[in-house]
Image: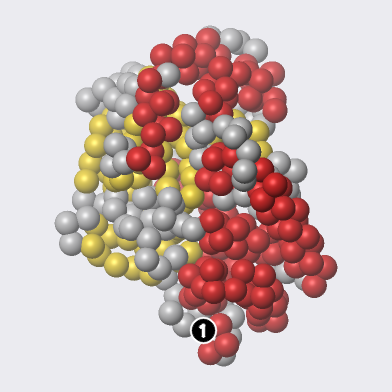
Amino acid sequence: MISLGACPKIHVSCRIGYVRARKRAFGTRVTAHNPGVGDVSRIHDAMRARYGKTSQRVLDSLAFAATGQEYTRFHPGKGLQKASSYIEGLSAKPFHDVSDLDYEWLRGLERDYPVILDELVSALTNPQLSTFGNRIWAAAAREEAVAYGPDWKTLVLQDRCVWDETNASLFPKTVEILKNHNVPSVEAFFARQAPSTGIKPHSDYTNFILTSHLGLDVPEGQCWMKVGEFKKDWVNGGGMIVDTSFVHSTANESDSKTRYVLIIRFWHPELTLAERQALQFLFEALDDPSDEGIALAIRTASRREATLKSSSGSAKKGCAEHRSLGLLSKGMK
C-alpha cells in the first residue's frame, strides 16, 4: 500500500470514498466536510498515535483512498470486485457461507422468521403506519438512485447502531429478536422491491462491511440476487450473506407480488477489534476534520473504549454484541 507521507496530493476521492463507505455502513445521516491535505494528514497522525500498528491496515486504506485510486479486481470464478474504501487481506467472496460459526445469529433469525413476518404483515395492514412511523418506505438516497431506482424502498429500524425509537416501537418483537440473538448490526431495515423491477449492476465500493438478507415475504422462484458470478433466489425464512463490493444486481420478476426482506449490515468478521475502533474514529474525524473535531473524535473514542473495557468481563449477553458492533454507541452524530 501507499504511505500517506508519499502522497503529493490528497485526492478528493479520499473524502468521497470514505463518506460513501460511511453511508453504506451507517446509513445516510452523513454531514462530512471536505478534508484537505492537512486535515487528512492530521487524522492519519491522530489515528496512528492512538492505535499504532494495530490499525495499520486502516491507515493503509486511508492512504490508498487519498490517492483517488479504486481497487478493482476480477476474481476468477467469483466475479468483479470494486472498492474505493478498501482494507487489504479480508476474504473476498460474493456469498458467504451462512453455516459459518460467525453467523450463528443469522440462523437464529431464520428460526424466528415466523414472528418477524407476522409483525411485518400486521404493520403493512395498518393504515396509520406512515403516520406513526419515521420515513416509512423511503426511496434510495440520491447518489444511489441511479442503480436502485424508485421502486426499492426501506423502513429503517437501526442506523449506525442507533435504534430509531419511533420505528423500533412499531416492531418490538423484531427488535427484541435481533437483540436476543446478538445480531452484530450497524444497520437494520426492511426493504421492499416492487413487482417487475430490479436494481442495476453496481458496487457499494466498500469491502469491510457485509450485508445479510432474510427473506420474509418473497415470490419464490421469481426473485433473485446476483453477486459476482453467482445468483441465488430469495426464499421465505432463508438467509444469505453477501459482499456488496462485488458488482451485484437484483430482480423481482413477479408481475404482481412485492418482495420484502430484512437487511442487516455489519462489520466484516475478519476485522480486528482495534481496526473497528480505528475505522469508527476515522469516520467521526472525517465528520469534522478540524483540530476541534479531531479532538472530539478522540474523546468520543476514549469514552466508548472505556465502556467496552469495563463491560468486557461482564457475563451479560450484550457484551458480545458490543464487541461485534465495532464499538458504535448510541448518541453519536
Residue toward you, 81 or 326: 326
Residue toward you, 38 or 3: 3
Residue toward you, 299 or 62: 299
Q: Where is residue 232 shown, x and y percent of the image?
A: 24, 37
Chosen colour scheme = secondary structure
Q: Where is residue 285 shown, x and y percent of the image?
A: 69, 64
The residue at the far right in this view is 292
Which residue is rendered at x = 17% and y = 56% of the image?
77
Q: Is residue 229 left or right of residue 109?
A: left
Q: Is residue 333 left or right of residue 67?
A: right
- Alpha-carbon neighbours of circle 1 within 10 Å: few (<14), some, or many (≥20)? some
Q: Is residue 66 left or right of residue 41?
A: left
Q: Where is residue 255 shown, x and y percent of the image?
A: 30, 22
Q: In this rendering, does residue 189 appear at all? A: no
Identify residue for label 1: 3
Q: Quadrant of residue 33?
A: bottom right
Which residue is rendered at x = 29% and y = 25% of the image?
235
Residue toward you, 285 or 307: 307
Q: In this rendering, does residue 81 appear at all? A: yes
Question: Amino acid type of disc 1?
Answer: Ser
Quarter placement of the N terminus = bottom left
Q: How many marks?
A: 1
Which residue is rendered at x = 48% and y = 64% of the image?
85
Q: Where is residue 50 shown, x and y percent of the image?
A: 67, 70
In the depicted structure, whether residue 222 falls above or below residue 318:
above
Q: Is residue 253 left or right of residue 303?
A: left
Under circle 1, the secondary element is: loop
